[in-house]
Structures are given as C-alpha cells and as structure tokens.
Image: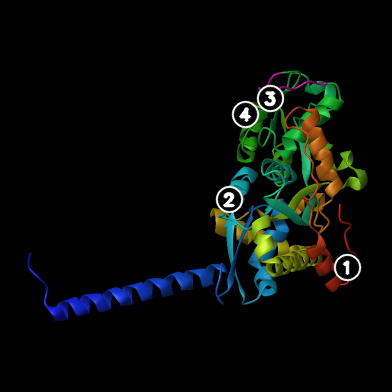
Amino acid sequence: MRRLPFRRLVSLATLAVIGVATAGTTAACGDDDSGAGGSGPVTLRLGYFPNITHAPAVVGVEKGIFAQQLGTDVKLETKTFNAGPAAIEAIFSGALDATYIGPNPTVNAFSKSNGEAVRVVSGAASGGVALVVKPGITSVEQLRGKKIATPQLGNTQDVALRYWLKEKGLKTTKEGGGDVKVVPQENSQTVETFNSGAIDGAWVPEPFVSRLVNAGGTVLVDERDLWPDRKFVITNLIVSTKFLKAHPDVVQKLVAGQVAANEFVNSKPDESQQAISAAVGKITGKPLDLKLIKQAWPTLEFTNDPIAASLKTGLDHAVAVELTKPTSLDGLYDLKYLNEALKATGKPEVAQP
C-alpha cells in the first residue's frame, strides 16, 4: 500500500482537528439559539388558530405585543393549526412549547399524559358558540330525525350538543344514530352542506355561527345561555410542563403578553378586528371578511380568567355522553404567572382552582 508523505499526514491531521473544533462550535451555536444551553436567546414556539376565538393570540402576534413583552432574550416562533389534536400532538412531540387551544383538547392532553404534559396558565376567550338550524326548526323536539353537524367527534362543541340533547331526552350515538343524527365534519364544510340540505343545522363556534346565519339559518341555542353568568371557556393558553420547568421566566413574559394582548383587544376592537382580518389573510391566503368579524364579535368575551369550573363541567358532560372517562384535573392549572401579570397591571387576580 502506498504511504502518504509526512507533510500530507500533518495537513490531514490539522484539518481533522479544525473539523472537530468547527463541529463543536456549530453545536454550541445551535444550543444557544434554542435556549437549551449557552448564552443565546431562548426560543419559544407558540401555537394558535387563525380565527376569531383565538383573537388575543392573533392580535398579540400581528401587533408585536408578544415580541415586546418577551424582549430580545427570547426568540418567538409561531405555528398555526386548524384543529386541537394537531396542536396537542406538536406539544407531545416536543415541536411546540405553548399553544392557545380549546377546553376538550386541554383535558385530553392532561389525561393522556397522566397529568404530566401541560399546564393551563391563562384564559383567553369565552362564548362564541351556538346551534344554528334551518328556519323551520323552532324547538328541540323538531330536531328528532334531523342531521346536526359538529366540528369533530368528541370535540368541545360535539360534547355540548350531545349533552344538551341528552338533557332534553333525545338520544345520540357515536356512529351517527339515535333520535338526532350527529354528523362530525370540518367547519369549512358546514355552509355548503347546510345550503345543500345535507345537514339541518350545526353546533359550531364563530365565525361559522355568523356564516350559517348569513346563509339563512337561525340560532336555536346560544351556548352562553346554558352557563352560569353566560361564561364558559372556549380558548385558554397552555404550556408544556417541560418548558415551564426549564424557563419559568419566559412563561411569565408570555402570560404578560397574553394580558397585554387582551387589553388591546378589549380597548381597541376596531383595530383588533382589522388585524385579525389581515393576519388570517397572510396565513390562509384569504383575509377574513371584516363584516363577518364585526358580526361575530359581540358573542365573545376576551378574558384572562380560564373559567376553570366550566372546563370541569365540560369534562363531566363528556363522561355523561360516554365520550371520555372520568379524569382528575388536579394540578392542571398553574395561575401564579397570570396573577403576577394581573397584579403588575392593577387588575384583580384569579383564584387558583
């Protein structure tokens, strides 16, 4: 075998040393950027849905409110989702650190991880859900034999519809049988199936309530009327327990951003509505109709209170209609960060459940 000259061997050895040093430097830079170690900024990956019920998140990102509160020591990365299960999967896989999400996915994440994976750190929104039906339907008894859509089997609105029907003496099945045929389908399909006669109504969140009303439907049930003080959680903010333990200071800043975003949404509704329309356009390629946003706006309340009692009641309803098993929610809420942010802005604190 031919031997390499001594100078060539030295050169190769030197390159090897340089290569190892460079690899080490690259790895260190990567750690710094992610916040896993070193002195670089911590990366916070925040999820939300591009819709009205997630207005604090949409406005907080669009108006730079989160970025301002997080400061230069935190790099904010945002991801948008169309359904709760996808956001929860991202939390479980480590691809997401925090997300705005509905109550049922929150319970599922907590339950499936045996209370380990997530914590609720703030509320965001209440209300904005209704049962819209064909104009000829004016009573619950007239729903017998009809087809009513919900966004997904076992989701928050699906549970609400099935429990309400059960309370009224009407049976449903997971397979779409019973006295009322519950038809799970994407919200984006509901107006088309409503107009075609494939469904007779839908229990949905805004802006789909308003879209169905504009398509000729009438509101049979405003879900706010079913809850004490007309308040129930539709969106809250959860964080990965792993991220919370590693970066409690970042979570504190995130929650301060949520409080600031809600303040903006409530004090500047017109500007917030325009921001939502523009933001949805950037994300989906089609701005959300500003008139539709204004129509839906009064049905929602943007609140930092997670309304924990309503989440527990929603779980009880899901158990009653046999869509989930009893689950302890002990440890789900960690509201000390919220109360610190509220105290700093002179707002009343929220009781820890």
Which residues, given as a range, are shown in magenta? Answer: 170-177
- Amino acid type shown at disc 3: Lys
Residue located beneath label 1 in the image:
347
Q: Main secondary structure of the magenta part?
A: loop
Of residues 296 and 322, which is closer to you in this image? Answer: 322
- Amino acid type shown at disc 1: Lys
Residue located beneath label 4 in the image:
196
Q: Residue 90 shows which numbered tag?
A: 2
State the image coordinates of residue 142 (x, y, percent, origin top left).
81, 22
Which residue is depicted at the point 62% across and 77% down? 72
Category of crowding for the residue at label 4, using alpha-carbon neighbours closer than 10 angstroms: few (below 14), some (14–19), many (at least 20): few
Q: CA distance from mark 3 to mark 2?
A: 27 Å
The first of marks 3 and 4 along the sequence is 3
Q: CA distance from mark 1 to mark 4?
A: 49 Å
Res. 70 image quadrant = bottom right
**Secondary structure found at label 4:** helix
Of residues 115 and 71, which is closer to you in this image? Answer: 115
**Outermost residue to the left:** 2
| Disc 3 to disc 4: CB gap under 8 Å | no
Residue located beneath label 3 in the image:
174
Measured along the vertical axis of the image, is residue 152 above or below residue 330?
above
| Disc 1 to disc 4: CB gap under 8 Å | no
**Outermost residue to the bottom:** 7
